[in-house]
Image (tube, helix red, strand yellow):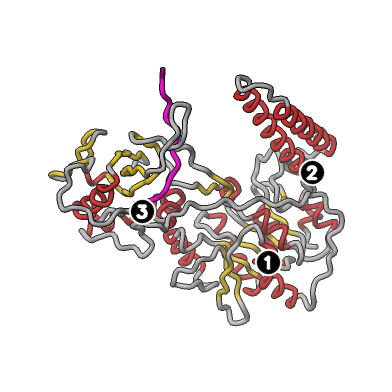
Amino acid sequence: MPSIVDDQTPSAVHQPVRSKSGAIASFVLSILSFAGAAWEFYAFSSVDALDLRFWFALVLVFVGIGCIRVGRRLLMRSAYEALTDDKRPPVVYLRPFAEDEGLTHQLPVGERVGGRSLASNLQWKASHEQWLARALVAVGPVVAVGKPGDRLAPLGAPRFYLADDQWQQKVDALLRGSGAVVLRPETSAGTRWEVEQVSQLIDHRRVLLIVPNPCQRPLAFARIKSLVEKAWPLPSEPIDADAFFFDEQNNPQPLKLGSDAATTLGAFVEQIEKLQGSAAPNNRGRHTRWSYRLDKMLHPEAGTDHAPRGVPGEFPDIPFRIQNGLLFCAAGTKPLAELVWAYGEVYTEPPSKSSMGSMWPHYQIVLWNRNSVAFVLPVQTKFCQAALDVLRSAAPWLPVGYSLALKESWNKDRAELLALIDSYRAGGTAFDAPWAGSNVVEVKVEAETTWL
């Protein structure tokens, strides 16, 4: 191995807490929590006690899950141990530290004013690191540089924790001895340096680029494409892909990542094994991580057009009026130029203590401003599409309609999205990005509370 293992011991800089006894205690506590939850569910004796026992049991379940997670993190090996146990050339995972905490949200993120409150805006980890680490260990130990200040080692790739004045030297040594590199490019100074080093030191066939999905985050993909195009050409047409590897002729090969990463990455793993001369032996040494699978969260159905047809030409029940560049609505008077996105939401009334709910759809118009505040206006079903058409006519530069790409661009690439919208407004042209949506999004809302 390169000198990175010998030049710096793990104790030279801050290391996260690792403890087998602490992990055992966490697992025991999780078992007790699950046992307590099971007892509470079993002990339901009356309808009056149902609410309290249910919530107490649910708390115990979440405590048990949290204890398992803490226990697994306490058992995470350091990268030094991983490279000592497994002598194969490592797979080096390079990414901005912010990616470790990145989240994907089910719906647009921001403050909402008016309308019905959403029941939830589900979120989940955006990083594919754990899936990548499980799949790529077939060709070598997967290691990464850890974020300074981690109290517990994250799940996924074992980490080096390096001093600020040494990390570039150590990453350079790692790259020179690596068997493959997983690179998540970004425009920060540190990541730009990593992109440059990988392009100079690593055979392009050994590189796996993790990129923003061009069908979901087209603005971010364009930014990354311009950053890496000198070394790794990426397609100009939108492809539903989360990653690319490159063949003999440096042609990009798209990959869609997911929970079944071992199958998804099979072509890349096979290419690395061929470059190593033969299928690499499974010399992993001791392996202390538990294997588990996270179910993939389902995206909302945003492709169904719920808008009614045959809307009449007059609009007596549209919940706003536009005049002289101002939008008048129940939430007050808003300058039209401050709006940056509008779309419709549809929901059905959920059951509550005082109501059985409703099977009929209800609609509301969502108007986002550049301060990430949404004004939500209820609208009659038959006038939802008419209201959106009025906005399209009065503000052609405004994205009107919902799409997964718009949602992801709003949540993760907002500055670039706002700059794009401003360019359309300055040019007085209609917003016609190919990934812009025209759909109404289906959401779930909180049950209304009736006070007696």
Point 77% across, 60% down: residue: 141
Highlighted range, magenta: 440-452
What residue is rendered at 75% in x and 61% in y?
137
Q: Earlier in the sequence, mark 1 or mark 2?
A: 2
For label 1, the residue is: 263
Residue picked out by circle 2: 75
Residues at marks 2 and 3, CA–CA distance in whole angstroms: 49 Å
Is 13 contained in the magenta span? no
The residue lying toward the viewer, choosing from 45 and 395, is 45
The answer for how far apart the CA atoms under marks 1 and 2 are is 27 Å
Crowd rating for badge 1 (residues with CA inside 10 Å; few <14, some 14–19, many 20+): few
Residue sitting farthest toward the bottom: 249
Across and down, in percent, residue 367 comes to 31, 44
At 58% from the left and 45% from the top, the residue drawn is 101
Quarter of the image where one finds residue 174:
bottom right
Name which residue type carries label 2: Leu
**Of labels 1 and 2, the one closer to you:** 1
Residue at 37% of width from left, 43% of height from top? 360
Badge 3 element? loop
Residue 5 in the image: state x and y as whole percent.
Answer: 79, 55
User: Which one is earlier in the sequence, the residue at label 2 or at label 3?
Assistant: 2
Residue 306 is tagged as 3
Does the CB distance between marks 1 and 2 fall below 8 Å?
A: no
Q: Amino acid at mark 3?
A: His
**Mark 1 and mark 3 in contact (Cβ < 8 Å)?**
no
- The answer for how far apart the CA atoms under marks 3 and 1 are is 36 Å
Question: Which comes before the other along the chain, label 3 or label 1?
Answer: 1
In the drawing, does residue 390 fall left or right of residue 276? left
